[in-house]
Amino acid sequence: MSTLIHACCCPYCHQTLEYGDDYRNQVIDCPACQKEMTLPDTPFPMPQQESVIGKFFNSIRNKAEGVRDKRKLKGMLVDAVADGFLTDDEIGQIQAFMAEVDLHPAETEEWSQELFQKAAKSLNSRNLSRERIDSLNHIKQYLRVPDKAVETEIVQLSRFNHLLSIREGNLESIDVQNVVLRKGEKAFWSQPSRLWESRVVSRRYEGGSSGISFRIAKGVTIRAGGSRGKLVSDTADVPVTEGNLIITSHRLIFQGESKSFETKYENIIDIDNHLDGIRYSESNKQKQRQIEYLSPNGDIIVEILSRIFSTS
């Protein structure tokens, strides 16, 4: 919006001066010659021209309004995608606001990665559904997020898609190397893992006592209360080797760098399955098997084993 500016000439130095309506008839010192003069009441109007100062402040005001509009738009987008869904009504409100303040969709690209990452955080193994996965893909497409900017989130979406597929009853077989599968046996998962075992880490003597000596005759003594020490061993769980835990339809197979073994499901008498690893006991073994997962796929392994045990 332009400001109505008037102009006149100093009667002494003839310098052209510009001033607004509120300054008419005011006595000022000419900024050029410093002589006192009165700004005329009926100057020459200049309705289409802005002063340099006016243009400067209008520019600042317009920039500030633009920043406020972009902040408001970002806030609207954050609120819309935070729950992992972006409805048609929300898109309509966003587009209407952008048209109102004259913002182009390309101006949102600087936030696209941040917004999609915020939306992806709303998804977890507890609220997992096909609708949520489809919605996140829709948000990614709407925000025009490049794959390279959100590689971690794409991998996580792929994991969740696999997990959901298992929950829906689809156990897909995979190819595994250096494993001979038996007739009718299928491999479902291969997990980088570390084998732990309980082992002796130190030994020491404890409890020895020399007892007390008594003289019973000249040159004769007897020692009573003495005891020999005993060897005490300290044990701890220690990492043994790294390798792959392979889950098949019939058994668990651990292929390690220095140790490998297999466990048939019918020999497992108890199992403790966590997101970061698994412990289980076998009917023909005294020690528990302890296997740590080296990548965050514990939720998928839990679902696979639950599916296998529920159908066996």
Image (tube, rainbow, N blue to C red):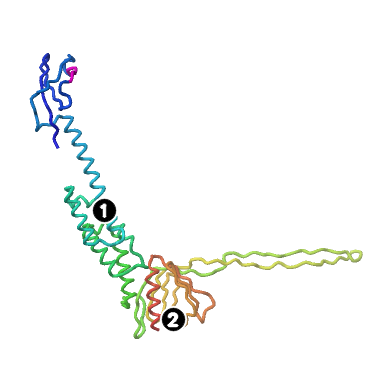
- In this rendered view, identify the residue nearer to me: 133 or 200: 133
Q: Looking at this view, name the residue that lies furthest to the bottom.
A: 183
Pointer 1: what residue? Answer: 76
Q: Residues within 10 Å of mark 1 (few under 14, many from 20)?
A: some
Q: Name the chief secondary structure element in magenta.
A: strand
Q: Is residue 198 magenta?
A: no
Q: Residue at x 54, y 77 (%)?
A: 286
Quadrant location, the N terminus: top left
Q: Which residue is mark 2?
A: 265
Residue sitting at x 81%, y 63% = 212
For label 1, the SS is helix
The secondary element bearing badge 2 is classed as helix
Q: Quadrant of the C terminus?
A: bottom left
Q: Quadrant of residue 215?
A: bottom right
- Name the mark nearer the viewer: 1 or 2: 1
Front one among 301 and 295: 301
Considering only vertical position in the picture, is 117 above or below 241? above
In this picture, residue 182 sits left or right of residue 35: right
Give the amino acid at mark 2: Tyr
- Residue 114 image position (x, y, % from top left): 29, 54
Percent coordinates x, y for residue 146 in the rendering: 23, 57
Q: Foreground: 160 or 238?
A: 160
From this view, report whether residue 19 is shown above or below residue 102: above
